[in-house]
Image (spheres, grey):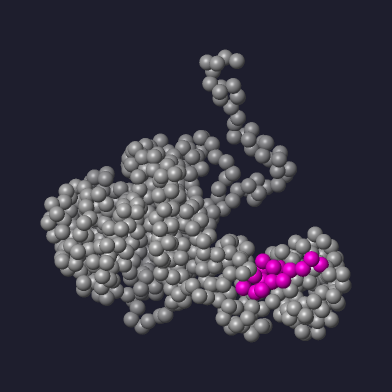
């Protein structure tokens, strides 16, 4: 072998046509697009393989980190993101002690949610930030009102400490249109709210390290939409702010420079990476259209938060796995700061244990996985580059539809955005009801012995929409995919005793075992006690054992061929002493129904509706 030749020169190149010939031969006539092309949550068609030639038309794939329009981010060496944790401020001295503690535990971007706006004073802000070096960390503030007072207090604190304003990074997360969309109203008129925002931007314009406007996409992602729709609606929200601020005499550079965007990160690993890359690309185009004169003004600064749609009450430690992959998506997508919410955030106030785990999840990605060492780690992936282009294209189409309606505010007032989000959420919940979308531990593979009642806060767990006569718009309601399943199981827990689903296994060994496992999992989703069995010699033996066990539901687990006999016999012997269910869709179903049997479960069943009907039969409300 000629050692001077490189390894890959020893192999002839393989063309796309040759690959397709091989794939089609292996498919033996099956449709390539149906068998191997899959669709994302947003309907994007993803091929099973991509090649360098797919990038020929993607101009952004030739850019470097730091190049406009910042698809690959702004960091040219390394990928250092900031680790954020929020603190609710009710006692300023206690909050100061808390922040000093978490800064020693890996947090580099503390956030303060000030509960009482009236408490914002220069003295209290000085107490809150005592001992903090403003050039070393990013500071974030959220307060419902009194943003001008907060800005003045921060400026006084920074001046007193002689901070280097070129090194300071502070965000005041004003988002009046986001609050309007979330609550259906503001405490002032929309125009007054935007006038106030414009004044705030003017007052902070001379402080390059302070941003005071934070359009947030979590409002949309936590209501059930996918990456494309979240991106489109967030861009529309940002565009609305650009229009409002420039109309009030603020330059496009100052308006864009005042913004830091927040995106939720969901379970779609690669699409979420591509979403953040596409977001920077599209925002740069929007900012340019408003007349920004400096390239850096068009850079979208991004904070990411792990999503809530897929978080669950049951089997809650799985939430740690979900937030870990979500945090990885945010890191690989180039988020500048990331909040990993504690695994129990959706159902109770997080304690020190869950906050520690949440912090350490990000530290592991940096210190052990070394994801902070490489700028734009996703670069060079043909798939990610193509997915970035597809998401950008689809999000831009939806963005233009909103703009054609008059922009974000006009579409919100018409109810267009809310209706689309509701339709998407309903479709996703329907998929979860049929287990087309899986929430591990909730609608599939539940822990049979788990009980949650002692550990959750009902008011925190479920969000109920209560219309009000003074609402200007219909609010966007946050939701979770697990909502209805959790209500179902909680109702079972409150019933006082767990209904027993008894597996009457008989006949063909492989079929009865497979159907017993399926059925056990099916009924455990509702929190029922499940009793599986090795098999019975006769139907009568099985029924007697079920009656002795005080079974509420008897599930027949056998083969399709045997059901015509054993199901009729079981129904006859039971004589109404328990609900009889057939596991499967046997060919004799119509015949069995004619005999009076009503209940059949299979992979085609709507799990949620079926279990709700059994709860009603058993008197569980």
Q: Nearer the viewer, residue 149 or 196?
A: 149
Q: Quadrant of the N terminus?
A: top right
Q: Is residue 48 above or below residue 349?
A: above
Residue 424 visible in this rendered orientation of the protein? no
Image-based side of 474 in relation to 38, left or right: left
> Residue 590: where, in percent of width, then height?
80, 74
Where the C terminus falls, by quadrant?
Answer: bottom right
Q: Residue at x 69, y 68 (%)?
A: 520
- Residue 204 percent coordinates (x, y): 18, 57
Of residues 235 and 452, the one drawn nearer to the viewer in this rendering: 452
Q: Is residue 532 magenta?
A: yes
Residue at screen point 56% across, 23% down = 7
Classify residue 354 as left or right of residue 598: left
Report how many numbered discs are placed on residues in the image.
0
Inspect this view and state whether residue 207 appears. yes
Residue 125 included in the magenta stretch of the image: no
Q: Residue at x 39, y 73 (%)?
A: 475
Quarter location, residue 238? bottom left
When asked about the image quadrant of residue 359, the answer is bottom left
Apparent side of residue 555 relative to residue 7 in the rendered image (left or right)? right
**Spot occupied by residue 466 in the image (x, y as percentages of width and height):** 42, 80
The residue drawn where x is 19% and y is 64% is: 127
Q: Is residue 417 above or below residue 205?
A: below
**Magenta-colored span:** 519-535
x, y (%) of residue 338?
37, 54
């Amino acid at each position: 072998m000629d050692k001077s030749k490189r390894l890959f020169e020893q192999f002839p190149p393989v063309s796309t046509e040759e690959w397709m010939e091989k794939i089609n031969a292996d498919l033996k006539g099956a449709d390539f697009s149906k068998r191997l092309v899959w669709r994302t949550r947003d309907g994007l068609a993803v091929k099973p393989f991509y090649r360098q030639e797919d990038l020929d038309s993607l101009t952004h794939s030739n850019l470097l980190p730091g190049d406009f329009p910042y698809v690959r981010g702004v960091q040219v060496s390394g990928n250092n993101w900031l680790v954020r944790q929020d603190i609710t401020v009710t006692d300023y001295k206690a909050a100061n002690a808390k922040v000093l503690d978490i800064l020693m535990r890996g947090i580099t971007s503390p956030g303060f949610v000030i509960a009482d706006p009236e408490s914002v004073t220069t003295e209290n802000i000085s107490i809150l930030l005592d001992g903090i070096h403003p050039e070393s960390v990013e500071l974030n503030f959220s307060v419902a009102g009194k943003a001008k007072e907060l800005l003045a207090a921060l400026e006084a604190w920074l001046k007193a400490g002689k901070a280097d304003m070129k090194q300071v990074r502070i965000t005041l997360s004003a988002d009046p249109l986001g609050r309007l969309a979330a609550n259906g109203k503001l405490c002032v008129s929309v125009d007054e709210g935007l006038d106030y925002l414009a004044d705030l931007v003017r007052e902070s314009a001379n402080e390059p390290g302070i941003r005071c406007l934070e359009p947030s996409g979590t409002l949309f992602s936590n209501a059930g939409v996918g990456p494309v729709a979240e991106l489109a609606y967030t861009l529309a929200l940002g565009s609305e702010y650009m229009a409002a601020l420039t109309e009030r005499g603020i330059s496009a550079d100052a308006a864009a420079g005042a913004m830091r965007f927040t995106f939720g990160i969901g379970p779609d690993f690669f699409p979420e990476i591509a979403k953040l890359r596409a977001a920077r690309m599209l925002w740069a185009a929007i900012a340019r259209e408003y007349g920004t004169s400096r390239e850096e003004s068009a850079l979208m600064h991004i904070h990411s938060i792990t999503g809530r749609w897929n978080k669950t009450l049951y089997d809650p430690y799985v939430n740690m796995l979900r937030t870990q992959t979500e945090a990885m998506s945010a890191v690989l997508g180039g988020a500048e700061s990331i909040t990993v919410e504690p695994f129990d955030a959706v159902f109770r106030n997080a304690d020190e244990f869950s906050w520690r785990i949440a912090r350490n999840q990000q530290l592991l990605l940096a210190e052990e996985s070394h994801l902070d060492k490489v700028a734009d780690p996703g670069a060079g992936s043909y798939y990610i580059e193509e997915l970035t282009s597809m998401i950008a294209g689809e999000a831009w189409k939806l963005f233009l539809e909103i703009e054609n309606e008059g922009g974000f505010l006009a579409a919100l007032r018409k109810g267009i955005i809310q209706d689309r989000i509701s339709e998407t959420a309903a479709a996703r919940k329907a998929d979860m009801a049929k287990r087309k979308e899986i929430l591990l531990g909730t609608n599939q593979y539940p822990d049979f012995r788990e009980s949650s009642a002692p550990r959750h806060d009902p008011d925190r767990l479920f969000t109920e929409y209560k219309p009000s006569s003074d609402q200007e718009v219909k609010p966007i309601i946050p939701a979770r995919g697990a909502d209805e399943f959790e209500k179902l199981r909680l109702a079972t827990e409150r019933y006082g005793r767990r209904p027993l689903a008894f597996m009457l296994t008989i006949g063909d060994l492989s079929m009865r075992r497979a159907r017993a496992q399926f059925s056990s999992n099916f009924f455990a989703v509702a929190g029922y006690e499940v009793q599986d069995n090795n098999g019975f010699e006769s139907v009568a033996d099985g029924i007697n054992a079920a009656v002795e066990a005080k079974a509420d539901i008897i599930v027949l687990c056998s083969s399709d061929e045997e059901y015509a006999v054993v199901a009729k016999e079981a129904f006859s012997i039971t004589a109404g002493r328990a609900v009889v269910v057939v596991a499967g869709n046997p060919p004799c179903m119509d015949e069995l129904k004619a005999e009076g049997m009503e209940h059949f479960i299979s992979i085609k069943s709507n799990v949620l509706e079926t279990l709700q009907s059994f709860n009603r039969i058993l008197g569980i409300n």
